Image (tube, grey):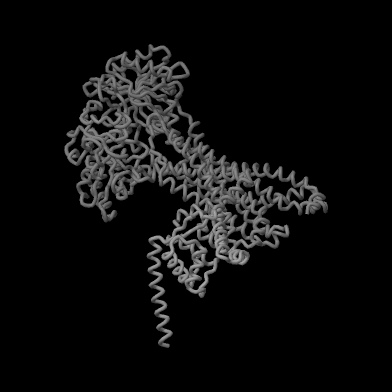
Amino acid sequence: MKKPDSLQGTLDLLVLKILSRRPKTHGYGIMAAVKDCSDELLRIEEGSLYPALYRMEEAGWIRAEWIQKETGRRARIYELTAAGKKQLGIEESRWLSASAAINQVLRTV
Amino acid sequence: MSLWSRVANVFRGERLSREIAEEMESHIAEAVEQGRDPVEARLAVGRNDQQRRQKESSYEIRTLGWLALLRADILFGYRQLKRNKVVSAVAILSLALAMGACIGAFRLIDALLWRPLPVAHAERLYAISREAFTLEGKPIRSDMWAYPSFSLMRDAVKDQAQLIAVSAVSRTDLTYGSDQDMEKANIQYVSGSMFQAFDLQPALGRLLAENDDRTPGSAPYAVLSNDYWTQRFGQDPHIVGRTLRIGKELYQITGVVNGPFTGTEPGTMIDIFLPVMMHPAVTHSDASWARTLVLVKPDTALEPLREKLRAISRVFEQQRAQGFTGPTRLFFQKIIDAKLLIEPVGAGISTLQEEYRKALGILSILVAMVLVIACANVANLKMAQSATRSREMALRVAIGAGRGRLVHMLLVENAMLALLAAGLGALFAWRAAPLVVTMIQSSDTPVRLLLYADWRVLGFAAGLVFFVLVLFGVIPALRTSAVKPVSALKGGDDDPHSRRRLMHGMIAAQVAFCFLVIFMSGLFVRTFESLSNKPLGFSPENLLLLDVVTQQGRPPVVWDEIADKLRNVPGVERVAIAGWPLLSGGAWNNFVSVGGGPPSALSTYLLAISPGWSETMKIPLLDGRDLRSGDTTPGEAMVNQAFVKTFFDGKNPIGKTFQERENHYQVVGVVADAPYSNLRDAIVPVAYIPFHEVNAQGVAQPETEETFLVRTSGSHPLALASVLRKAIPQARAGFRVSNLRTQEELVRAQTIRERLLAMLAAFFSFVALLLAAIGLYGVLSYSLQQREREFGIRIAVGAGIGDIAWQATSRILLMVTLGAVIGAGLGIASVRYVETLLCGVKGSDPVMLIGPALVLLAISLLLALPVIVRASRIDPKLMLRAE
């Protein structure tokens, strides 16, 4: 069920970060946000996004609820939990140290 | 998402899928709103394979995968069980019966033999006993000690262990008021230090203490068990300080034990604990009445402790033996040389345990064999089923199911079967175990055994389910799942031979165990028969026995007067008086010397009786005369045939004399042999002496208790019970009936254990036979079904009915024979373990082996008949067209 995936960490980081800035966003909103903020450089596939969302929901980092939209359609929106905020901190520092390390390698070699 | 919500999601599968789909829809709608091309958006989400993968992994994350599978398996298994209703019912019922019997047996054995006493440090509790050899070389064991010997040992080993004396339990008359309100209760004399050693706390008042163990006769205190306090007094808080009287002794109730402790004797619950110092024989060196419990201190080696105890006990007996000569001296030497044994008794120690330990062991082996038979049965049923399911399995394999998955699925199905059976079986055990306890009751010794239904029993049941599952579930599951899709889907069975071999092996095993069960039960039934048909030598019918007591002893003439008054009661034919009834367990034996010679090596049993006793008992007078009024002890005596044979070489003894202690008797009559204290032993020499006892000055001695034997004319002696109960105190004030029984009851009580074993063993052999028959029939018809095509061809090419019948049944009948031979071998090998429980039947008797063999042969032929008929009716045309 859980495959270690180097990109998965980044995906989690992106989703958590977006939800911390824009709570109560639905799946499409998260996808759009990633695309917009990265100037369309990064793109999340639906096939990765939703399993990731459910996984993080299961881990207790985010919680979901159904809301009724003006159009009459129901949408499932997500927001961070306390554990999620902590996790975001961990992921962020991990990313910073990893990218710093990679940068250093790139510079010194 | 919590674990719980994932578990819940398993059971909301439909809704969950809907929710995921809805979220996808809303995603697409959102995309379209944002100006994406609807087709492109749907493609992004809905690319066929991708969506499926996505949904499945989404689904898996929101549920516990394995739990969902389990749920599916359970539903499927339930449907499978429902589809084959008959097979499932047979499987569940046969397993339930066998498992129920196992659980019931466990409850009994646990309650009587295994469950630790509710005391502190039960694991360090031991008891000591002596093992010696009689003059005839028979080993005898005794765990009773004289109190002076006990106190020597207690003081000597007090650094290594704490010794506790407890008397045998006696059901005694006592009163909380006047003599008219006499009642019975179980009393036990115990060391006061026991309560502290066992860390027992009072619910009320104080318990006995070490201080109560100091001076004989100085501690007239009584402690009640919680159970008795509740049952008898409704937990009366003012009980402390009340008095009770036993005989002439007044006791003050000082407290009530807290908790479930009712003594150290499983099977008997103590109502009242009295201090050992109040025991009438506490100072006697020649009365062994105290069981010695040893609470060993932590980290004490047992062997040095045992040696020390033995040395002290030996010195004690040596001192006691001084001054004895002849056979008595020899007898003492045996006691002195006795081995001292120390054994753990964390589960308590009682005569009921000793009496039933082996019987229960045998019973548990019988039920275990029935369980194995039932498991083999169900395994065979499942295996036959697996043949019909091989196509289904092949299909599953073909579309990608792994073998592990199939085994999982089949095991779940089998586990459901086992659990259902265990549930039914537990119900059965719940009713059956108390029934067995009531079966071992006799009027004299009420057996009270606390039967529990707690985690121990539950744990056993769970273990049983697992064991049963391994036994009947795993092999068929592996077998069924090991299909080769190609051959199975083509219509042929994959390797039918190996499956058939397995089934045949199980038939052989089933028959072997079945044979053993029938063989054993045959032995027990014969034992019971031979004991109950044993010639008694007297007539127990219409004989009422009244144990009568009087506070102050009265001379024998007063007792005679009462007997005269009873003779006038309508419906009474004859009345006689005796010290105790035959077969009541009461006994008095000693060495006698004949014709002024030295004391005999063989001891003689004595019984004090009144004139007319032998007539009332209907024991024929063979020579000389009956006792008559005016005969006294010492003075005249009647003896039985065994006495004549032992001491007078079978010659006419009339007029000869013998001596017991300082008393001289002249033989005036000879009566026929009758069993004295139990039915199992050989007839012992008995001297019947007058209950009119006089001292050296010729003064009649007072008696406090005797038994009146009343022969009634009606066929229901108990109809006179209440009349006689009233007649005694009316005949003479101060006399009272303390116990009323019939002689038939006593005779029946002699065979309680044998009756129990015979009944249960017969029941289990019936069950075993039934199960084996079901299994046998199942395999016979299965193998016919498998070979119908072959038989069709054989018939088509001209095989006769005899040939077909032989083909259809020979292999299985061979297995039955093989099983029977193995069973007989097992029977012969195991018979020596049950020999001590047998009486009047030899385990090596070939008749006992032929019986079960014939039964099994008859059953298998009977079962083969319908199969042969079916085989002979196979229409080759139909059969061959069908394929």
Q: Is residue B829 above or below residue B253?
A: below
Give the percent coordinates (x, y) of residue B824: 57, 48
Q: Residue B703's quadrant in the figure?
A: top left
- Which residue corresponds to the image point at 27% horizontal and 18% vertical from the top-left? B734
Left or right, B37 with respect to A100, comes to right
- In the picture, the quarter occupied by the C terminus of chain B is bottom right
Give the percent coordinates (x, y) of residue B89: 60, 43
**Residue closest to the eye, B689 or B779:** B779
Report how many numbered discs are placed on residues in the image. Answer: 0
Give the percent coordinates (x, y) of residue B855: 62, 41
Farthest bottom residue in view: A109
For residue B164, say whether it is visible. yes
For residue B590, say whether it is visible. no
- Which residue corresponds to the image point at 76% horizontal and 53% vertical from the top-left? B789
Q: Is residue B796 above or below residue B869?
A: below
- In the picture, the quarter occupied by the N terminus of chain B is bottom left
